[in-house]
């Protein structure tokens, strides 16, 4: 069996030591392994012990890398495993490092998922589908995803979705009710809300317009259409094209007719 002929402290990391067997550098280990295996000059080492020490040393390195990664924010087990794979640690080493992280409560996917849920609701205003996708990306078990999402009740979903709908409606006052509804529907769908919740959120809103509001809206959107088409069309063709566009946007016929009459009078 090879004999340890020299042990030197690492230059870049004084907590690591270089082990020489038969006057040749063999491997380096952490200080804890020097103590655990009682490594001293003249000690014989069999191949099994050397491999065991190298494995434990790799696990310790992986564990320390994971701790550094977890120091910035909470992470899921899947995120930690992905990071350690990027650092080129083997599967067996990663398994042991992750096991140790759980034992010391540095990893807890249940706690992580619950915190993610609350953050995505409060800050991201996201619906259950989008949150589930976030969990999926982070490697959370499907059963755990389903369990955690039960804490996001339909009542709370409706409350958050309605708040978003109200903000959109307030911002889009120059649009027609149908345009506003479509805007809300598209936005809430992207946020991950189910159709039933979106429908209820829209129904809570008062999107009716009075006469002056309709005229303000039709003038604003009609003028844009007019400018867009007047370089290619004129006369009845231009009026017809703009009228068609305004119908598609959801303006009432009488409001469109009043606007077209105003524009035609301007051109006389």
Image (cartoon, rainbow, N blue to C red):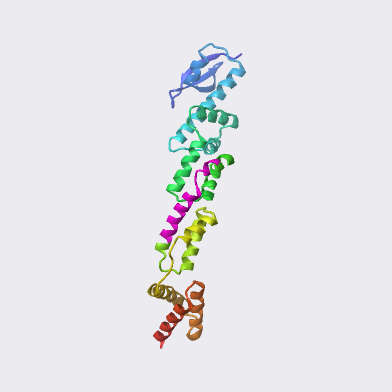
Q: Residue furthest top?
A: 42
Residue 92: image location, x then y, percent: 59, 29
Q: Nearer the viewer, residue 225 or 17?
A: 225
Q: Residue furthest bottom?
A: 268
Region in magenta? 147-168
Residue 229: image location, x then y, percent: 48, 78
Q: Nearer the viewer, residue 246 or 99?
A: 246
9 is higher (above) or lower (below) than 226: above
Query: Is residue 150 in the magenta section?
Result: yes
Residue 12: image location, x then y, percent: 44, 27
Residue that appears at 56% across and 34% down: 88
Name the quarter where the C terminus is drawn: bottom left
Q: Nearer the viewer, residue 104 or 204?
A: 204
Residue that appears at 39% across and 85% down: 266
Residue 25 figure quarter: top right
Name the quarter where the N terminus is drawn: top right
Image mark count: 0
Q: Is residue 47 left or right of residue 40?
A: right
Report the predominant secondary structure element of the magenta stretch: helix
Query: Is residue 180 in the magenta section?
Result: no
217 is higher (above) or lower (below) than 123: below
Q: Nearer the viewer, residue 222 or 62?
A: 222
209 is higher (above) or lower (below) than 128: below
């Amino acid at each position: 069996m090879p004999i340890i002929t020299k042990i030197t402290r690492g230059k870049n990391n004084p907590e690591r030591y270089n082990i020489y067997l038969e006057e040749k550098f063999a491997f380096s280990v952490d200080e804890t392994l020097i103590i655990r295996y009682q490594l001293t000059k003249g000690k014989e080492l069999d191949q099994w012990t050397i491999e065991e020490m190298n494995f434990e040393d790799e696990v310790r390195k992986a564990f320390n890398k994971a701790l550094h990664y977890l120091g910035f924010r909470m992470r899921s087990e899947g995120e930690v495993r992905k990071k350690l794979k990027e650092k080129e640690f083997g599967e067996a080493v990663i398994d042991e490092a992750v096991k140790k992280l759980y034992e010391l409560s540095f990893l807890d996917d249940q706690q992580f998922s619950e915190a993610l849920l609350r953050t995505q609701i409060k800050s991201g205003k996201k619906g259950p589908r989008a949150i589930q996708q976030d969990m999926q990306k982070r490697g959370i078990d499907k059963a755990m995803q389903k369990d955690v999402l039960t804490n996001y009740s339909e009542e709370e979903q409706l409350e958050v979705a309605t708040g978003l709908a109200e903000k959109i409606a307030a911002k889009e006052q120059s649009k027609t009710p149908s345009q506003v509804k479509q805007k809300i529907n598209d936005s809430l769908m992207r946020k991950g809300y189910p159709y039933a919740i979106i429908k209820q959120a829209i129904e809570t809103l008062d999107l009716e317009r009075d006469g002056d509001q309709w005229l303000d809206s039709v003038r604003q959107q009609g003028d844009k259409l007019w400018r867009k088409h007047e370089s290619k069309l004129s006369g009845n063709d231009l009026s017809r094209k703009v009228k068609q566009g305004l119908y598609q946007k959801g303006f009432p016929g009488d409001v469109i007719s009043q606007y077209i009459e105003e524009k035609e009078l301007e051109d006389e």
